[in-house]
Image: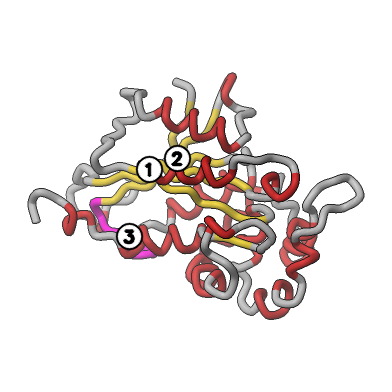
Amino acid sequence: MPVHIYTNWNSRPYDNQEQIEPFKKFYFICEGLNTETYYFRRLIDLRKQLGIHQLIELRLCEKTGKDKDISFPKNLKAFADAQKKNPELGFDPHRDKMIIVFDGDIFENKVSGYDELVSSIEENDIAAVTNPGFELFLILHIEGSYYTHIQGHEAEFLSMDEHGRYSYAYNVLRDLTHMNAKSNPKIGKLADNVLTAINQEEHINQDIHKLKGQITSNIGKVIKMIINDNPLNHSKFN
């Protein structure tokens, strides 16, 4: 099997009721191997606390083996499409969604084809994009961080360092948490404050179609959509 699936569907039944099969599943497929994995594992564990409907299952598809280093967004989409055919995942194209999480910074200067990529993802699935990177979204989990560390510093977030990397968000997050987000699993605990991130994200650009030149994140918007989703409203049983 080319992926490791993380879910807590069978381990945390709601209110000690008999566990039922999910009606709808969201699969997170991420560009990064570490930071995003730490975060979404914790987010999945918070499913009940966030009030996500009991018929919705969250799954993290962790790349393994020869697929481990897939990171280029176009290749992530191809990987996600391939996983839909994996019978072990049980993907239902009529109900389930792949959420492809990637950084938009490479499309600022180095890579073209962003609009076409997002449009192709959104034909059937969900694009969750940050510009410059995932660390920007993590910063939003800290109360007041938009006003103290983002507002007025937009240019710094989108400026490359002497090594040609967008490192400003990483450095801000490190200074705020005293953790290396790329190697410390405890960074995932920021997910406990996801409602703060959802609220603060509304202060920055959430329209991923207008990403270039703007600090951007729609990950909180996507998570809010999942929290508010009631699959029975869209089912044949309704």
Distance from the alpha carbon under mark 3 to that under mark 2:
27 Å
The residue range painted magenta reads 49-55
Q: Is residue 169 above or below residue 76?
A: below
User: Pointer 3: residues within 10 angstroms few (<14), some, or many (20+)?
Assistant: many
The amino acid pointed to by label 1 is Glu
Q: Which of the numbered marks, if any, corresponds to residue 120?
A: 2
- x and y, in percent, of residue 110 in the image: 74, 41
Q: Quadrant of residue 228?
A: bottom left
Residue in the foreground of this view, choosing between 125 and 4 = 125
Helix, strand or loop at label 2? It is helix
Q: Is residue 69 above or below residue 119?
A: above
Going from the N terminus, do you reach mark 3 or mark 2 first?
Answer: 3
Residue at x-position 45% and y-position 42%: 121
Cβ–Cβ under 8 Å for marks 3 and 1: no
- Figure quadrant of the N terminus: top left
Relative placement, left or right, of 105 versus 55 is right
User: Pointer 1: residues within 10 angstroms few (<14), some, or many (20+)?
Assistant: few
Q: Is residue 97 above or below residue 135?
A: above
Q: Nearer the viewer, mark 3 or mark 2?
A: 2
Name the chief secondary structure element in magenta.
loop
What residue did someone put label 3 on? 52
Q: Which of the numbered marks, if any, corresponds to residue 123?
A: 1
Residue at x-position 38% and y-position 57%: 47
The amino acid pointed to by label 3 is Ile
Inspect this view and state whether residue 8 appears: no
Relative placement, left or right, of 151 versus 117 is right
- x and y, in percent, of residue 41 in the image: 50, 47
Going from the N terminus, do you reach mark 3 or mark 1 first?
Answer: 3
User: Pointer 2: residues within 10 angstroms few (<14), some, or many (20+)?
Assistant: some
Residue in the foreground of this view, choosing between 231 and 46 = 231
- x and y, in percent, of residue 185 in the image: 64, 48
The amino acid pointed to by label 2 is Ser
